[in-house]
Image: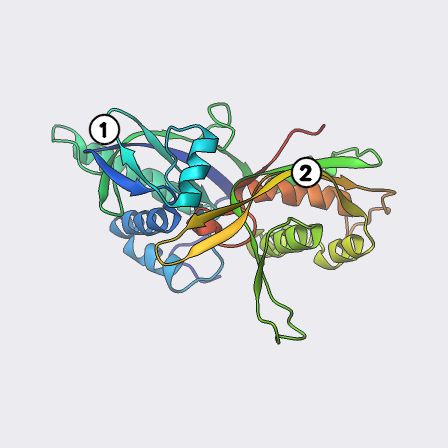
Amino acid sequence: MDTPFSSTSPAKLYAIMLKLRPIERGTLMAFSGELVHAAWLDWLRAAAPDVAAWLHEGNKRRLFTCSALQFPLPVPRMQQAERENVHLPLDPEKTYTVRITLLLSELFPLFYNSLMHFSMAELGTKRQPFMKIGKQSFLLEEVISDAESSDWTGFTSFATLVETARQMKLGNPEPLVLHFDSLTTFNRINLKNRTYGNHYARVPWPVYVFPGLARRWQELAPPELAGMVQKERIERYIEDEGVVIEDYDLKTHGVHFVNFPQRGFVGTCKYHLRGPDEATTPDAPLTVRQQLFLLSQLAFYTGIGYKPTMGMGRVRLCRRV
């Protein structure tokens, strides 16, 4: 991969929370995913223009994700505002959050160094806006990156994900529960017959979830680990109904981008991964079920489905139950 920087660090994944405070009172649309996406690239463009240009224009691998601005409101109230496309008030006395994930190791030191430079530049001066989301400017209050402070922050490496999956001893069946926290959908089209065009699927069937994550693993993982996931075996396992939906608490949901509405779903889905497991080999050291758990942990950083770089598809693996 041609990048504006050389790759010498271990392949890691980061999930970071930015706590922001508006400079003045105003309003912002309830779902601001594409505005945060643009604001993040603007911030990065000021810190490293060549990297921002490469991420935005020269690369289709989606090496980061952004959430919408998270308001300090109960989930039902927030979801209602998203569905109705309500502009919510911003209060300088309150803090708001944005979640950023970085899927390329080199982006984290770039972010950290730029953040330190920004903080040093503020010393002895009036605090400068850190980020402008739409027409609203925000100060940076805190950066959270450790897993203990939030269910949505943390970091890991591809090697750690592999080793965690390798050590898993799975029952038969083994439950796997995914929590879809922000609007999720899958942009689907029949490649063999395009007569009816695409549609947006609003149920997380295994065939929609796991092959897409397998492709992301093979795109992002270092070459020596890319083969730990075999997409063809996963697709065959799904086709043979090795993984089924056992239970769910899902509901349809909708948000509004600047120029169009988008429908999808939120909630939790419990899958059963059914055995028996095949024998592992040097060429396939993880069973298919271990691979599905590995991919579910990857999804915490990459998101799932359509537009994860713009606030959609935020998901996490719930504790094994």
**Residue 192 shows in the view:** yes
Residue 216 vertical position relative to residue 270 in the rendered view, above or below: below
Q: Is residue 53 left or right of residue 277?
A: left
Q: Residue at x 33, y 49 (%)?
A: 35
Q: Residue at x 62, y 40 (%)?
A: 250
Residue 18 at x, y = what percent?
Answer: 36, 34
The CA span between labels 1 and 2 is 39 Å
Q: Is residue 37 left or right of residue 189?
A: left
Tag 1 residue: 92
Name the amino acid type tagged 1: Pro
Residue 95 vertical position relative to residue 194 in the rendered view, above or below: above
Q: Residue at x 70, y 57 (%)?
A: 231
Q: Nearer the viewer, residue 73 or 222?
A: 73
Tag 2 residue: 248
Q: How many marks?
A: 2
Between disc 1 and disc 2, whose residue precedes? 1
Residue 214 vertical position relative to residue 253 in the rendered view, above or below: below
Residue furthest to the left: 125
What crowding class fits label 1: few (fewer than 14 Cα within 10 Å), some (14-19), or many (20 or more)?
some
What crowding class fits label 2: few (fewer than 14 Cα within 10 Å), some (14-19), or many (20 or more)?
some
Residue 167 at x, y = what percent?
Answer: 74, 34
Q: Secondary structure at mark 1?
A: loop
Name the amino acid type tagged 2: Tyr
Q: Nearer the viewer, residue 84 or 316?
A: 84
Residue furthest to the front: 84
Q: Secondary structure at mark 2?
A: strand
Label number found at residue 192 = none
Q: Quadrant of the C terminus?
A: top right
Q: Residue at x 28, y 51 (%)?
A: 42
